[in-house]
Image: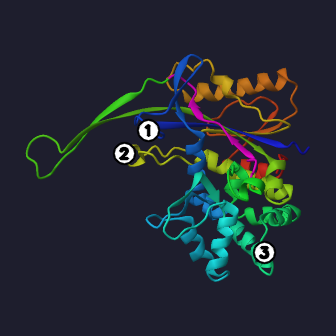
Amino acid sequence: MNENFINFHILISHSPSCLNRDDMNMQKSAVFGGKRRVRVSSQSLKRTMRHSDYYRQHLGAPSIRTKHLWDPEKNNLKEYVLKALSERFDKELIEKTIELISGKKLDSETKVENDAVAPWVLEEVAYFCDQVKAMEMESIDPKKLQKQVEKDSIAFRQALASGLDIALSGRMATSGLMSEIGQIDGALAVAHAITTHAVDADIDWFTAVDDLQELGSGHLDTQEFSSGVFYRYASLNLRQLQQNLGDASREQALEIAAHVLHMLATEVPSAKQQSFAAHNLADVALVSFSDQPISLANAFEKPIKVAHNGGFREPSIKELNAYWDKVHRGYGLTERCAEFSLEAIDLPEDIKQQVSLPKLESWVRANGQNT
């Protein structure tokens, strides 16, 4: 009864909005089932989650993501770490440590950047500072340091755990000591959210009125927008999460999973929200414990049509559950499933109904057992 994957299936209806834009300032979209769907990228969803107040309250501060290791003209990693760790380590040790793990020489006059934006965890840098300090009596050999960290891998992972978003999303490092021991396979896979139905976007032609100008407008522009029911899908590998956190218990991983569920059902990207205020919560949250990641996106490969009494919400909910039942029975799956819905609906017999999102979160914490 310890299936390794938790699959999250969320339906959330957004009122008119433009939550995620491309380089042309248009809504992100995708063609699925031969029809255009509005899309919210996985990067947007993950950033929204890790920068939410809920994340900070329940999971701690997110990692620092930057390519600016040292740039006198910008906020940079070196200055951030020096300020945060000044009472624990001296400046020279901190600078030496950042150079070792990044593979970059921090020159006081030269702009130093990583090859790409990478996540950094303060306690992870502090861990390496301790290791470097222990070797100060002899010349610091990066290979010896690497072997020491590999030998002490659980302590290294536990230091990394203070940046939980790295354990969830992973990290690819391309230079320095981090390229050898800092690679992290993410435990959480998040799909791009797409509308369950075809979408024809609207165009908002708007003006900014100049109160001191008698005629005309101070500014004219256009903005694409639309509304729709979005399917959000994510899969959490519990065993990978436990490993990434330094052999954490399953109970710890399940606690994190419950918070991931909450954020997937409640957090919304902030783009253009001052103009549209599409602060909508999920209509349905279906969760399953499984031996493999399983998306239900194909429930909407044939675009949902408007119900006879109007709206996409109810037919989307019905199709999600019907398709889950087809897959469940067709492949003989033994998933443990539970669902919370704002609508009074008939569920397939193998899905446990939960009366609220907090009840569904408690079910996740209890390893998919009745609570």
**Image vertical order of residue 12 relative to residue 85, above or below:** above
Q: Is residue 301 above or below residue 339?
A: above
The x, y position of residue 350, in whole percent, is 82, 32
Task: Using the image as rendered, state which of residue 177 and residue 278 is in the foreground.
Answer: 177
Mark closer to the chain start, 1 or 3: 1
Residues packed near mark 2 inside 10 Å, few (<14), some (14 to 19) or many (20 plus): few
**Distance Cα–Cα, label 1 vs label 3:** 55 Å
Instruction: Tell whether label 1 touches label 2 (CB within 8 Å).
Output: yes
Q: Is residue 225 left or right of residue 248?
A: left
- Three-letter amino acid code of the residue under disc 2: Ser
- Element class at badge 3: loop
**Which amino acid lies under the numbered mark 1 shown in the image of this protein?**
Cys
State the residue position of label 1.
Answer: 18
Is 52 in front, or is 103?
103
Crowding around mark 3 (Cα neighbors within 10 Å: few <14, some 14 to 19, many 20+) is: few
Local secondary structure at mark 1? loop
Q: Residue at x 51, y 46 (%)?
A: 269
| Residue identified by numbered label 2 | 275
* Name of the residue lying farthest toward the left: 214
User: Residue 237: horizontal and vertical position, in percent?
Assistant: 79, 45
The quadrant the N terminus occupies is: top right
The residue tagged 3 is 139
**Residue type at mark 3?**
Ser
Tell me the chief SS of the magenta region: loop
User: What residue lies at 57% left-to-right and 69% top-to-bottom?
Assistant: 78
**Relative horizontal placement of residue 328, taking residue 224 as reference (left or right):** right
Magenta-highlighted residues:
183-198
Secondary structure under the numbered disc 2 in the rendered image: helix
Comparing labels 1 and 3, the label whose residue is closer to the camera: 3
